[in-house]
């Protein structure tokens, strides 16, 4: 058992010693690790830290707004919000292959981040929310996706290109310790206990070509699902849950008319390590409520299905 106030005091001292009076940049993603790293480093060095939040247009509903409210608003940290959604969507136009989509998103992400970093010539450090399991895993990526996770999440190669030193204050911590630290630093419980969200975001949850129209529909359907999971206490009983957009139209009826609209799949899994996973046995009443709400509230979706595939043989994400 560790003493949190002592830990924070020591970590803050270590960061101050390391950084001195130099400046630090950090890529904020909205995820747990980069958020906790940002809060800790901000606690240590305040305005010597600049966070760069790259919005690729593939975030969940209100995510960008929430990140800005938390870090710029509540913590008074310096945050540069880069809305790069048009650039990302532009480069994804016509691309349907999942790995190619990942590559493009990762590449654009590095490019946008680099361009921002160059505008901060005083920065000498690149901070990353690398945690202990990342350190172990980066020894040998287990599969293509795992490899992409690292290269995207921890902006591989960037420190060298930019001539920056690496600051990784969470390197020795496990996930649950990172979460405890986040709460102790004043981050909201819901942010710190969030399900993981992949770096390529909705880009791999819209099957095939990514279009902004699809992203808008998916964001709204996903928000309803998450909303109902939280309301029913199922959010914390699942490891990851989300909606997937299927670019397939099926027939439905609404009032006197026939509809011909898109399908959304719901995915909820329980897992310890994300290497294997069980589909969550959500109550039928909950699934029914989510389905009704999505079909009633999201015009353009007329059918909702539930994914009952385990991993293996299916993966957690659909791409
Ligand atoms: P799969 O779909 O491989 O997912 O069963 C296992 C875990 O990894 C996440 N995931 C990703 N995370 N970039 C990421 O940062 C990616 O490209 C990526 N692909 C999958 C997935 O959300 C799940 O938690």
Image (cartoon, helix red, strand yellow):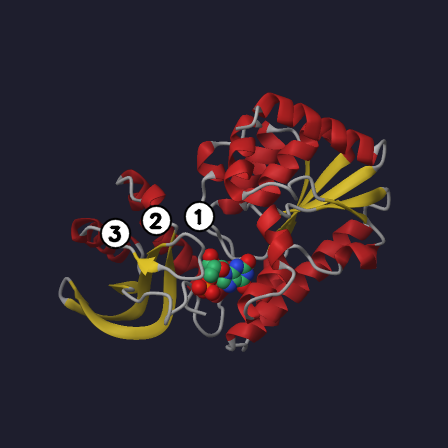
Q: Mark 3 CB in 8 Å range of ligand 1? A: no
- Residue topped by disc 2: 238
CB atoms of marks 3 and 1 within 8 Å: no
- The residue tagged 1 is 195
Q: Which quadrant of the figure has residue 279?
A: bottom left
Name the secondary structure under disc 1. Answer: loop
Real-space Cα separation, disc 3 to disc 1, in angstroms = 19 Å
Mark 2 neighbour density, 10 Å: few (under 14) some (14–19) many (20 or more): some
**Which comes before the other along the chain, label 1 or label 2?**
1
Question: In the rendered image, which residue does mark 3 sit on?
Answer: 290
Residue 205 in sight in this render: no
Q: Could you give the CA–CA distance between mark 2 and mark 3, rounded to whole angstroms?
A: 16 Å
Instruction: Give coordinates of residue 131: x percent, y percent.
Output: 61, 46
- The vertical placement of 177 against 212, above or below, is above
Residue at figure coordinates x 64%, y 42% from the top left: 172
- The reply to whether callout 1 and callout 2 are in contact (CB within 8 Å) is yes
Quadrant of the image occupied by residue 127: top right
* Left or right placement of residue 74 versus residue 158 in this view: left
Q: Position of residue 83 (x, y in %)?
A: 62, 52
| Element type at mark 2 | loop
- Look at the numbered disc 3 and give the secondary structure of its residue: helix
Left or right: residue 70 compared with residue 307: right
Above or below: residue 64 compared with residue 150: above
Q: Is mark 1 within 8 Å of ligand 1?
A: yes
In the image, 251 versus 109, the foreground residue is: 109
């Amino acid at each position: 058992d560790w003493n949190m106030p002592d830990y924070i005091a020591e970590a803050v001292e270590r960061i101050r010693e390391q950084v001195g009076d130099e400046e630090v940049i950090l890529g904020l993603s909205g995820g747990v690790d980069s958020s906790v790293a940002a809060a800790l480093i901000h606690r240590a060095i305040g305005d010597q830290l600049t966070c760069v939040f790259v919005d690729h247009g593939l975030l969940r509903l209100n995510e960008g707004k929430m990140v800005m409210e938390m870090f710029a608003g509540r913590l008074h940290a310096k945050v540069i919000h880069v809305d790069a959604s048009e650039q990302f969507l532009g480069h994804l136009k016509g691309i349907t292959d999942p790995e190619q989509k990942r590559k493009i998103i990762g590449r654009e992400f590095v490019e946008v981040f680099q361009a921002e970093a160059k505008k901060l010539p005083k920065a000498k450090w690149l901070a990353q929310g690398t945690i202990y399991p990342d350190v172990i895993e980066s020894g040998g990526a287990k599969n293509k996706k795992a490899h992409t996770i690292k290269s995207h999440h921890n902006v591989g190669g960037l420190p060298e290109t930019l001539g920056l030193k690496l600051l990784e204050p969470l390197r020795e911590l496990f996930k649950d310790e990172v979460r405890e630290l986040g709460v102790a630093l004043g981050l909201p419980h819901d942010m710190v206990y969030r399900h993981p969200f992949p770096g390529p975001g909705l880009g791999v949850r819209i099957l095939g070509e990514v279009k902004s129209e699809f992203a808008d529909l998916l964001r709204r359907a996903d928000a309803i699902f998450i909303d109902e999971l939280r309301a029913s206490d199922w959010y914390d009983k699942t490891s990851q849950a989300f909606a997937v957009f299927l670019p397939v139209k099926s027939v439905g009826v609404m009032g006197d008319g026939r509809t011909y609209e898109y399908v959304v799949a719901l995915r909820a899994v329980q897992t310890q390590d994300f290497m294997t996973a069980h589909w969550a046995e959500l109550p039928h009443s909950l699934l029914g409520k989510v389905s009704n709400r999505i079909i009633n509230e999201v015009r353009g979706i007329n059918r909702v299905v539930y994914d009952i595939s385990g991993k293996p043989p299916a993966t957690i994400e659909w791409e």
